[in-house]
């Protein structure tokens, strides 16, 4: 069997580097791309090298960043530019292989196994791609080369900026296994804590830990990360234009001001539920697992989940479950609520037909369906605020947002290291 050649290529501090490319003078000052503080979406999305040296950390609040670096220049994100330039970079990748799988805007895997027949040695291909991206676009990229996607990604993180790391079957135990287990893809803060509780601190510790105990503690996810740690990931790199069906559809929002009761939250929750219902219908999907995420005013995160008897894409049903989960699990007396989100998963395509139930009012469900569609059509033609529920007029400041169109692209790993409590109802 031919040994695979997988690249993982990462545009170094992508958003900040694009801003530096547009305005070269920014290279001489500590600079970061951040959210909108007035809308309380105030986190650092990317920073340049000078800001990094000053102690600015991706994912921290703008206030924390300014405490680390008083002279920090914070620019608002220009997503249209970031999409344009990252797509231009990936167009170069696609000249070498049809198997280019995006991982966010700034990262991608490439399967260059067969590319060797046309372009020669894989390392020369990687160096050529690096140089072309720099010469033609003006951006630096780091490359990891390995026989699987997981180790290739680890490699791209090891040397920045514009580095290259090769991880082989001969050297991976020396290069990968000493790394913290949290460096492994899909090992987030909560998973790392569970592993630490069992004496697993490095990727090597994880590779040698009994799989049966991992499965007992974490289910299928425990077995999966064990496979990753041992270098046995065989997942393919998807073709460039392959569309992966979504596993969940949702929206979350940092509220313009803290809310202190369920009743006060109701208007904003309706707006978010409507956006999720609209997204589901646009995708032709419906699901029966609803997950609610909540962030308190002291920045603790909580998640709750429930499974419905029937699949849904209706705004009222999503809203009702959302409010019930929050009412059952969140104490407004402990701390006001700062952010909230809801997602629907276990998705299936909606064909237009479903098995009716005697346990629900199917006539009412049909009415809600037509109401949702009518509102979506009006908003598409005349704007989001052209039609609203009366309850959203109670606090216009709180509900003056369009979550379907306005959202923040958070960096990978933003929630790692944050205090989070999760559970299933």
Image: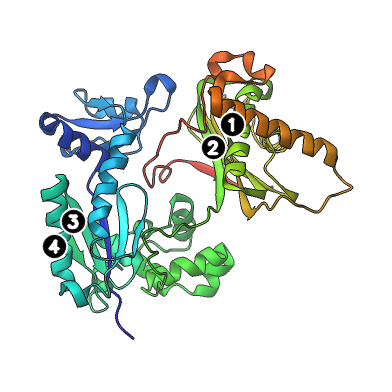
> Closer to the camera, 74 or 64?
74
N-terminal of the pair, mark 2 or mark 3, is 3
- Secondary structure beneath dot 1 equals helix
**Residue 278 at what x, y percent from top left?**
60, 37
- Secondary structure beneath dot 2 equals strand
Would residue 253 appear left or right of 25 to someone viewing this image? right
On residue 127, which mark appears?
4
On residue 424, which mark appears?
none
**Residue 242 at what x, y percent from top left?**
43, 60
Residue at the (43%, 24%) spot, across then down: 40
The span from disc 4 to disc 3 (Cα, nearest Å) is: 14 Å
> Closer to the camera, 259 or 312?
312
Coloring applied to the structure:
rainbow
- The nearer-to-camera label among 1 and 3 is 1
The span from disc 4 to disc 2 (Cα, nearest Å) is: 39 Å
- The nearer-to-camera label among 2 and 3 is 2
The span from disc 1 to disc 4 (Cα, nearest Å) is: 45 Å
| Residue that badge 2 annotates | 251
Q: In which quarter of the image is the N terminus?
A: bottom left
Whether the residues at callouts 4 and 2 have beta carbons within 8 Å, the answer is: no
> Where 166 sits versus 344, above or below?
below
**Residue 310 at what x, y percent from top left?**
76, 50
| Residue that badge 1 annotates | 272
- Secondary structure beneath dot 4 equals helix
| Residue that badge 3 annotates | 159
């Amino acid at each position: 069997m031919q040994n695979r050649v997988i690249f993982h290529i990462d545009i170094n501090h992508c958003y900040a580097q694009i801003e530096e490319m547009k305005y070269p003078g920014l290279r001489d000052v500590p600079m970061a791309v951040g959210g909108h503080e007035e809308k309380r979406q105030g986190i650092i999305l990317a920073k340049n090298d000078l800001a990094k040296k000053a102690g600015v950390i991706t994912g921290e609040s703008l206030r924390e960043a300014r405490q680390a670096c008083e002279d920090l220049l914070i620019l608002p994100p220009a997503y249209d530019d970031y999409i344009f330039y990252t797509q231009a970079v990936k167009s170069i990748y696609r000249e070498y292989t049809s198997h280019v799988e995006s991982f966010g805007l700034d990262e991608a895997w490439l399967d260059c196994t067969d590319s060797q027949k046309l372009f020669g040695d894989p390392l020369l291909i990687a160096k050529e791609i690096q140089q072309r991206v720099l010469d033609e676009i003006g951006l630096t990229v780091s490359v990891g080369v390995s026989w699987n996607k997981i180790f290739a990604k680890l490699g791209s993180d090891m040397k920045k900026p514009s580095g290259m790391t090769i991880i082989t079957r001969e050297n991976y135990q020396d290069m990968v296994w000493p790394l913290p287990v949290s460096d492994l893809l899909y090992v987030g803060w909560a998973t790392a804590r569970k592993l630490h509780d069992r004496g697993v601190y490095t990727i090597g510790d994880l590779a040698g830990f009994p799989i049966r105990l991992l499965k007992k503690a974490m289910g299928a996810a425990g077995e999966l990360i064990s496979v990753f740690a041992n270098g046995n990931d065989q997942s393919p790199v998807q073709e460039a234009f392959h569309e992966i069906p979504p596993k969940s559809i949702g929206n979350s929002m940092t509220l313009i001001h803290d809310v202190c009761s369920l009743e006060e939250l109701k208007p904003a929750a309706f707006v978010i539920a409507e956006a999720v219902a609209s997204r589901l219908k646009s995708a032709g999907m419906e699901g029966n697992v609803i997950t609610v995420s909540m962030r308190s005013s002291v920045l603790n995160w909580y998640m709750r989940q429930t499974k419905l008897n029937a699949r849904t894409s209706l705004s009222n049903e999503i809203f009702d479950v959302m409010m019930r989960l929050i009412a059952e699990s969140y104490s407004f007396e402990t701390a006001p609520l700062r952010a909230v989100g809801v997602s629907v998963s276990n998705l299936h395509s909606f064909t237009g037909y479903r098995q009716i139930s005697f346990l629900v009012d199917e006539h009412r469900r049909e009415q809600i369906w037509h109401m949702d569609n009518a509102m979506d059509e009006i908003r598409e033609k005349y704007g989001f605020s052209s039609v609203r529920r009366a309850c959203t007029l109670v606090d216009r400041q709180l509900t003056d947002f369009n979550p379907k169109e306005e959202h923040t692209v958070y960096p990978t790993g933003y929630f790692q290291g944050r205090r989070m409590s999760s559970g299933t109802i």
